[in-house]
Amino acid sequence: MSLDVSDESRYDRTRLRQWARGRARSAGVDRRHLLKLFAAGAAAAGPIGLGAGAGTAGAAEATGPAGGALAPGIVKALPPELFTVRGTNAETNFAALRGTGQLTPIDRFFVRNHTSTPRLEARDWTLRVWGGGLAGGPVEFSYERLRALPAVERTLFIECAGNGRSFYTSQQSQQVSGTAWTLGAIGVAHWRGARLSDVLRRAGMRRDAVDVLPRGLDDEVVTNGVNLGRVRRPLPVSKALDDVILAYEMNGRPLPADHGAPVRVVVPNWIGISSIKWVGDIEVSDTPLYTPWNTDLYRLFGPDHPAEGSAPLTRQTLKSAFELELGATVPVHRTRLLTGRSWSGAAPVHRVEVSTDGGVRWQRARLHDAPRRGAWVRWSVPWTPRTSGPTALLARATDATGRTQPATAAHNTQGYLFDAVVRHPVTVV
Ligand SMILES: Nc1nc2c(c(=O)[nH]1)N[C@H]1C(S)=C(S)[C@@H](COP(=O)(O)O)O[C@H]1N2
Ligand SMILES: [Mo]
């Protein structure tokens, strides 16, 4: 089954209608209560609140005994040259990608945890598929049974919906809630796993099933005293059957703990929250499902959107980033190669232009990867700064749909889907 953009927008419209008619089952959470909670959070929280952002641990950054940053609950090492710790999360420093290949090495792949990384053993793990959208009762898959299914391999990014959020504030002077990521809440990996469609068919999914709901085995998420339950976000059956993977390998190795071991969902091109880590069960439903992650979170809210928010967010947007620290100092009259990466959830990146004078003149960057949907392209341009002082580097991508990164991103209260050209400050000395 194929799913193109028009199918997805049809799906979004249908869902919005179902939502408006109140047909949805509310998946165990009092919606009015939550809406109030999130509204209060957004108003009070400034840059940090609930969103694709803070977990239970709040915004404080802890410092470890060796002086390195400690993100409570992340297992792998987080040296400050590779990561910036933000609450329970770790952002990849883009400068640390310079010289690496198309795949993000696992030692620098960002981590977004609502709570903390659980330690699960493959031999103790089972995936339970259950619900009213199955012909019979629940079906269980052991790790071995999953690995015995036909394997698929794909190179795909996972990117948080809130990636780039801090630029709403720093570049557009707008208030948003959630983790103040710069552009490093993305990584590209080579995934290997079973097709979700194979698992659903073997579990006896019925033709009238509409949603599947993968749920993580990490701790329940508690925000301001309200228990939202385990991390879970419904996927429409059309997407689930199209290209979703139950991944057990990342970059040729068993999935690491922080990225969902032993098995995670990988949803190509969609916002990161769709790709549930540490998946333990999947509900298959014959009615639409709602959880906080597709109602009050991961929709667009604000004056330009309906009171109940936009349709649930699906595809990622278009972005570019330099492999250079924000605020870097560079020597005058010396030629250097500016490098970076661009990506889009909609189509392959077609063209990248770079400006080194704050956006007055633009030149085409040389692309170093064959553009493919689902991954990024690396690019470069030589630059010889001629005058000293502060300036801004800009990179602007266009994808194969013809869309170019705009000068400003459309504001929404939770700061999702920032897609504007970022003004990357540097000082020439
Ligand atoms: N079970 C579970 N799955 C999860 C999350 C989580 O906290 N728990 N975070 C989600 C979010 S918001 C993102 S952006 C991605 C991040 O994946 P990564 O940590 O492997 O980079 O995982 C998603 N899947
Ligand atoms: Mo995310």
Image (cartoon, helix red, strand yellow):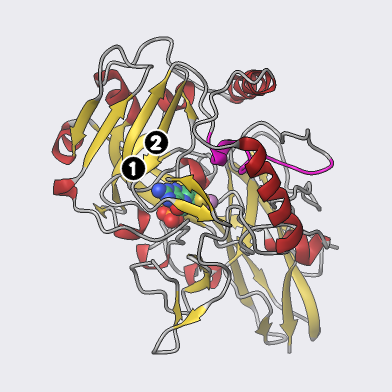
Tell me the residue at 79%/86% (across/down): 388
Magenta-span inclusion, residue 71: no
Q: Is residue 421 left or right of residue 262?
A: right
Tell me the residue at 37%/28% (across/down): 283
Q: In which quadrant is the N terminus drawn?
A: top left
Residue 330: give its label.
Answer: none
Query: Looking at the image, is 109 positioned above or below residue 160?
Result: below
Towards the viewer: 207 or 363: 207
Q: Picture quarter containing residue 12?
A: top right
Q: Secondary structure at mark 1?
A: strand
10 Å crowding of disc 1: few (<14), some (14-19), many (20+): many
**Residue type indicated by callout 1:** Val
Towards the viewer: 52 or 164: 52
Q: Are marks 2 and 1 in contact (CB under 8 Å)?
A: yes
- What x and y, as percent, mark residue 243? 41, 30
Residue bearing the label numbered 2: 214
Q: Is mark 1 within 8 Å of ligand 1?
A: yes
Magenta-span inclusion, residue 293: yes
Residue bearing the label numbered 1: 279
Towards the viewer: 384 or 316: 316
Can you see residue 136?
yes
Query: Looking at the image, is 308 positioned above or below residue 45?
Result: above
